Image: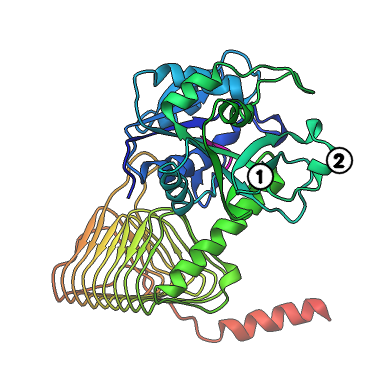
Amino acid sequence: MIAKQTAVIILAAGKGTRMKSQKPKVLHEICGKSMIGHVLDTASFMAPEHIVTVLSSGMGEVADSISALSASVIQKEQLGTGDAVKPALEKLKDFDGNILILYADTPLITRETLIHMLQSLEVADVVVLGFRPQDPAEYGRLVVNDAGELESIVEFKDASEEERYIDLCNSGVFAANAAVLQEFVAKIDNKNAKGEYYLTDLISLAKNAGKKCTYVEGNEDEVLGVNNRVQLSEAEYIFQQRLRYKVMVEGATLIDPETVYFSYDTIIGEDVIIHQNVSFGPGVSIESGVVIKPFCHIEGARIKSGASVGPFARIRPGTEIGLDAHIGNFVEVKKSKIGKGVKIGHLSYIGDAEIGEKSNIGAGTVTCNYDGYNKYTTKIGKSVFVGSNSALIAPVDIGDKAFIGAGSTITKSISSESLAVARNKQINKENWSKAFRAKNEKKDG
């Protein structure tokens, strides 16, 4: 349990020029959600009293995207992390509790780690998240005394040769008592190799004043900072691995896990089988016992128990696929409600439609739902048989147990238990082929 109230500061003022993008860095997505969105979700899990995000001027798009979850303040000049937290602390000047300091471009940090840090504040005034990377490179080093207490954080450029051999590194994530932050951040100066205000100086300032500082150790993966497209892909991979693991331990089978891609909010039930090369966009819920065959893309859809989808199917937003329904190869479904036991086996487009249970939709069927300006609905009743290569021109209603002959273009509604055939009359010309061949073979000779 966490005894004190919590506030969260998220630092997001960096320009992100290494991303080479017109889009603000922190709005680039991982598993379908922006990096800052991931950080906000993790922070929100702890139900903090306040979340304050530090932006630089000109980041209105970011401010708009987070306004429902976080207040925003502006860092006027980029003078270092010690300077960045100041406008947030001004916003929190009346807050008396614990404060977490996170980074909008470090989206993989876990709830468990943050809870551990806050719990550690019960016996310390400041807690830093450390980690041991395979290559310490130019990370700041955590200097720990024999008692296991954190003495200081030394930036690489300011570190001695001995300090550079330390493999315990600084992630930049802090937790501290609000009063301690308010007091000692104001005392940070910029007398260092880079001429910046380092938030890391907080440790030595607090320690010299008799405050207790400590650290918790996290995994290298969760403190990955994303500054370019390569690191963005690394973060995507790590997050996908987490989601794959979660899905499998909760009872689903992934035939080839490395080829299945989830969104941050994908819901997968027990005994679901997902074959290789399947991609889930945001807003997908898959109930128990569903089979997703290879090379499918599913987004914004609900698939009910016992259904099968694919291979090579595309399920678009607004779709609900009913119990035990079958969506086959090269079928696209958009914003449609597919009833229990419906079969749409091959090469069809179903858009803005409602299909009653146990209906069969033949190969090559198209619901023609768009006239260039407006979308219209096709309603198909229960136990309807639609012949292959039929075009249903919406709006049109097909009654229960109706039959539509193959190759029909349906422009009018069909009553229940009726047969509709809408195609030109077939004409056979005897011996036409024989004469045609003879004529052309003569030319070739």
Q: Indicate the quadrant where residue 365 lies.
A: bottom left
Q: Nearer the viewer, residue 311 or 367?
A: 311
What is the span of residues highlighted in magenta in the rendered image? 102-106
Q: Nearer the viewer, residue 362 or 312?
A: 312
Q: Of helix, strand and loop, which one carries label 1? A: strand
Q: Indicate the quadrant where residue 291 lies.
A: bottom left
Residue 387 horizontal/vertical position (percent): 34, 76
Residue 362 seen: no
Residue 315 seen: yes
Q: Of helix, strand and loop, which one carries label 2? A: helix
Q: Is residue 252 magenta?
A: no
Find residue 144 and name its label: 1
- The prevailing secondary structure element of the residues shown in magenta is loop
Residue at image x 14%, y 68%? 415
Find residue 161 and name its label: 2
Find residue 93 and name its label: none
Residue at image x 42%, y 76%? 252
Residue 71 horizontal/vertical position (percent): 39, 25
User: Which comes sooner in the sequence, label 2 or label 1?
Assistant: 1
**Quadrant of the snapshot with the C terminus:** bottom right
Which residue extends farthest top? Answer: 76
Q: Is residue 147 above or below residue 125?
A: below
| Residue type (three-letter) at the residue carrying disc 2 | Glu
Residue 262 horizontal/vertical position (percent): 49, 60
Q: CA distance from mark 2 to mark 1?
A: 16 Å
| Residue type (three-letter) at the residue carrying disc 1 | Val
Of tags 2 and 1, which is closer to the observer? 1
